[in-house]
Amino acid sequence: MASQHVIAIAGISGKLARYVVQELLKQPDVQIRGSCRDITKLPTELTESPRISLVKADPFDVETLRNMVRGCDTVMCCYYADDKTMFEGQIILIDLCEEEGVGRYIASDYTADFTRLDLGDIVVKDPMKHVKAYLDTKERVKGIHILVGLMMETFLEYFHVWNPEENTLRYWGTGSEKWDLITYGTAAEYVAAAALDRHATGVLKFAGSQLSVLQMVDDIIAVYGIEPRLERKGPLEDLSPYLKSTGSPQDTIAAATYHVLTGKASLGETLDNERYPSIQPKTFREFLKARKA
């Protein structure tokens, strides 16, 4: 095994990317290269670290990105942008990895954009379906697709599931359908572990908690000492008209809810958590405790 692991992160300014950097720097043999549009907006822990080198580049700055990825063991994409950037920007990175002999490319699947994924069949919709298919054609660079579910920090508000002020849990369906949840910190641990695992390739799935709204009740009672009121919003079939909508954020949330709760965009029961047994995922109950503190 090489004495040093050099990892490039395209889009290092993103929230998850910064968590991943924190995890990677816990390993003394890791050197990080990062790109972003505006280095001046990065925190000092990134700009002043002697183990991080930064370049100013947008996703289409080919020659700057080429210099960044050259000599790296792994390149990681942390873009979270429009479909054009998510596809064409990653095609550029993949081609550069192939040309420069980079062994592995971690695609940006792990951003948990479930409006784009059909994880039940491990078929990724536009644009990630095309990114995965393109990676599969390459001979030198191997793709890694990390799927982690929804971030607990944004899940409750974004999907309007729990209102702590009203002490109300809202749900579609029967209430027994499972949500795949994870914290930013736990997701970053798994992404970093895969980045350092020279044998990791293909699709990897990780979660902190897989639980239904009805199961969330026990966690809320345990943490807050009060039973939440349950409010059923309707059957899942009522969400199906939103699947073809490309309009408001509310329509997007409704479509994503349908895909997740019907299992079309769920991680399934077979996870890869045991691949990295040293990682102890934060559960939903532990997340609520930390949030309450």
Image (cartoon, rainbow, N blue to C red):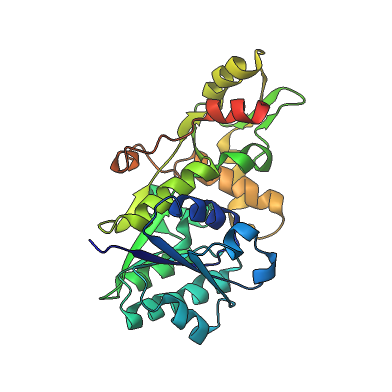
Front-most of 80 and 26? 26
Query: Going by the image, does 213 lie left or right of 124?
Result: right
With respect to residue 204, does 64 lie above or below?
Answer: below
Look at the image and tell me in which quarter the N terminus lies.
bottom left
* Along the line of sight, the residue nearer the viewer: 252 or 188: 188
Image location (x, y in percent) of residue 266: 44, 43
The extreme right residue here reads 165
In the rendered image, residue 92, in percent from the top left (x then y), is placed at: 46, 79
- Asked if one can make out residue 148 in the rendered structure from this viewpoint, the answer is no
Q: Is residue 221 left or right of residue 108?
A: right
Q: Is residue 150 left or right of residue 146?
A: right
Name which residue lies at 55% across and 67% down.
Answer: 11
The mark tally for this picture is: 0
Query: Can you tell which quarter of the image residue 172 is in?
Result: top right
In percent of the image, x 58 and y 38: which residue is there?
152
Residue 195 picture location, percent across and down: 37, 57
- Quarter of the image holding residue 37? bottom right
Kindly identify the residue that appears in the image at 65 percent across and 17 percent down: 224
Which residue is located at x 57 percent, y 74 percent? 84
Q: Eyeballing the image, is 217 above or below 111? A: above
Please tell me whether residue 122 is drawn above or below residue 165 in the rendered image.
below
- Residue 287 location in percent, x, y? 57, 31
Looking at this view, is 221 or 23 the one in front? Answer: 23
Residue farthest along the left direction in this orientation: 1
